[in-house]
Amino acid sequence: MGTRSAQRCGVGRSYYFGMVGFSRRAVLLAGGGLLLGCSPRTEADEVHLRLATGPAGAVYRRIGGALAEHISEQVPGATVTTVPSGASTDNIRMLRAGEVHLGLTSLDALITSDGSAPGGLSAICRLYDSHLHLVVMAGSAIGAFRDLAGKRVSLGAHDSGTEFTSLRVLRLGPLEADGRNLSQAESAAALRDGTIDAMFSLTGVPTPAITELAQRHPIRLIPLDAQADGLFTAYPGPYAPAMIHATAYAGVPATRTVAVPNVLLARDDLPDDLVYAITDTVFRHTGAITSAGRDDAEALPEAWQINVRTGISTASVPLHPGAAAWFRDRKR
């Protein structure tokens, strides 16, 4: 756990702290002019952060990159490097081990069976909701969830939120399938090539791997409305019935499913003012994060879900004190 010693200058505070993973002793310089009146920043004032994202073909990889880019641009002295991962469960593990400082996760993978969150971690904010996709090729004999019995099904990458949620869905069935651990990009390729029969994907809508598959080959989404009801009843809190709209993927009609919120996590030992500045960047630069210098075809539409009203809703996961302070200041 890093040690903090606070000093006041101007209208802000800066904390010096030591923590494994930082290349120098870091000083917080909050964005948006929080440290007006302070002495100029020196090289020793720089802070280097690692943000755990997700696998190839996933929204986590893209939105994590956009967040890293804009935090690096908007928080003076901060540089954020993305770390590819299996996604949610893998990101939680790396955060708890001190391998990264920030990470993305689905809320259901974070909240334990008794409704609590792991110690040492807290939320910066809720970002957007992921939807559980169950994808098959258009000519598949699979027409309903029950038809997955005995079939070759990708459950998502090992330690991903997709794996976590799809295993819960299968257990609630109860239904036994020939599960495979493949990333989103690997799943889409395997489905196209016929080496699997179906793929689960818990991700933002639309997600790149499924979009690219649907543009080249006809696909279908299997409804999961009954499974949504089962998850909502068995695990109150992180689940809600939802719809993947007909505009999401080429040739695919609207499909009922389940939604799970995603949150941006931080280690508890990150300084409050640093997290305050990161929170400020997320909500003040949503438009820039959405486009992230991309053309319309590569924009991040899920980032439009980022807003102050829902950002504070992290269920039983506590807000980091720096994030909580930012939300309090917004109410003044």
Image (spheres, rainbow, N blue to C red):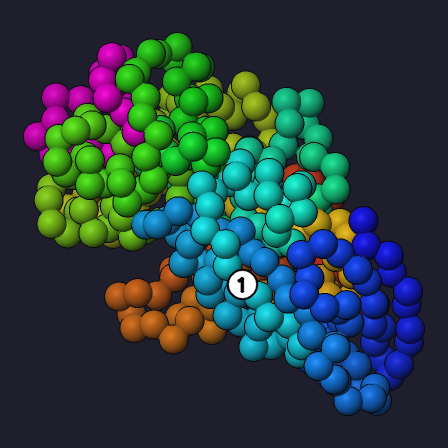
Q: Nearer the viewer, residue 266 or 24?
A: 24
* Horizontal side of residue 24 vs 61, given as left or right: right
Based on the picture, tell me whether residue 197 belongs to the magenta stretch: no
- Residue at 77% of width from left, 72% of height from top? 27
- Residue at 90% of width from left, 68% of height from top? 6
Residue 41: where, in percent of width, then height? 75, 85
Disc 1 target residue: 81
Dividing the picture into quarters, in which one does residue 330 lie?
A: bottom right
**Badge 1: residue crowd in 10 Å (few <14, some 14–19, many ≥20):** some
Q: Nearer the viewer, residue 312 or 282?
A: 282
* Horizontal side of residue 248 vs 300, given as left or right: left
| SS state under label 1 | strand
Residue 126 seen in this snapshot: no
For the image shown, how many numbered marks are present on the structure? 1
Q: Is residue 186 above or below residue 44?
A: above
Residue farthest to the left?
A: 139
Based on the picture, tell me whether residue 153 belongs to the magenta stretch: yes
Residue 182: where, in percent of width, then height? 32, 35
Q: Which residues are magenta?
A: 134-154
Residue 156: where, in percent of width, then height? 36, 34
Quarter of the image with the C terminus in it: bottom right
Q: Amino acid at mark 1?
A: Thr
Residue 297 seen in this snapshot: yes
* Horizontal side of residue 284 vs 230, given as left or right: right
